[in-house]
Amino acid sequence: MNKAAIVNGGSGRVGCARPGADERGRRAFLEDGDRPMAARGAGRESARHAGQLARLRALAHPLRFRVFQEFAGHRRTTRQVAEILGEPPTRLYHHVNLLERAGLLRLVETRPNRGATEKYYEVAAPRAGARRRASPGTAAARRAQAELASLVFDEARLELLAAIESHGAGGGAGAKDVTTVARTLLTGGPAQMIRLRKQIIDLIRRHARAQKRGAARAATDGADCWSLTFAILPRRGAPKS
């Protein structure tokens, strides 16, 4: 999905196993088989929370968040993203590697180029069962979630201000017709809000699937890129029902 920061998503790191990794994995599997089922379940839950925290921390960085967005919907190299962002490639290699290690990006292709190897990455698809809502968990996880949420809405604010400025300068006639800001207050219980969230997400996914089917045509039609940011939140200071 274009411009999507899927906090719970991400597959494992793509790449060659380090020497001895197979033996370590076999030994860990055997040791895990000797552990009681409850202990194994607790270990998996702990690993899941650790993975969530790693993904949150990876995205909760202004430059890294911008880098991640540029891989959404596109297979690109670090150098290509650097050109888009106006940054030196050497500044981004560390951030791309960290996003890959966190399972947010995956290596999809390598190409030889003048004695070097170009690496193409894309946003990793969510793992099965990884779409469950992230639990705030520890204080560190809550801090990372708060930082990421601030980044998301700061990015939306900057894009909105840029769109308003562009409209005032007489540019972007099409964008002027589309740019939308809305806020509304809703009433209902948590179950109703969950259904509303599902309906919104399903609508976005349907658009993304249709976009993917028409990706080749869109690439030749000069399709623009848009962002959509939404939040369903309990109103601050509202009395409890």
Image: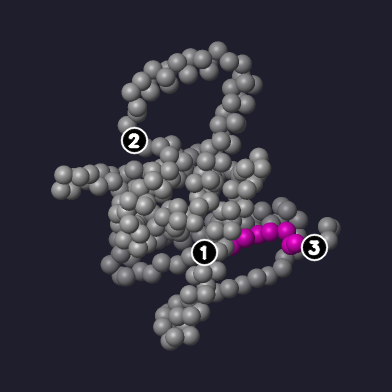
Whichever of callouts 3 and 1 sits on the residue coming sooner in the sequence is 1
The type of residue carrying mark 3 is: Ala
Q: Which mark is residue 87?
A: none
- For the record, the magenta segment spans 230-238
Residue at coordinates 28% horizontally, 46% vertically from top-left?
A: 119
Residue at coordinates 16% horizontally, 44% vertically from top-left?
A: 115
* Cα–Cα span, label 1 and label 2: 31 Å
* Cα–Cα span, label 2 and label 3: 49 Å
Q: Taking the image as drawn, is residue 103 in sight?
A: no
Q: Is residue 235 shown in magenta? A: yes
Q: Which residue is mark 1?
A: 155
Residue 101 at what x, y percent from top left?
43, 39
* Quadrant containing the C terminus in the rendered view: bottom right
| Residue that sits furthest to the top in the current view | 34
State the residue in front, 139 or 123. 139
Q: Which residue is mark 2?
A: 15
Secondary structure at numbered mark 1: helix
For this view, does 20 lie left or right of residue 57? Answer: left
Residue 189 at what x, y percent from top left?
76, 56
Secondary structure at numbered mark 3: loop
* Cα–Cα span, label 3 and label 1: 27 Å
Marks 2,3: beta carbons within 8 A: no
Q: Which residue is mark 3?
A: 238
Residue at coordinates 72% horizontally, 68% vertically from top-left?
A: 185
For this view, does 168 lie left or right of residue 45? Answer: left
Q: Nearer the viewer, mark 1 or mark 2?
A: 1
| Residue that sits furthest to the left in the current view | 114
The type of residue carrying mark 2 is: Gly
Q: Is residue 1 shown in magenta? A: no
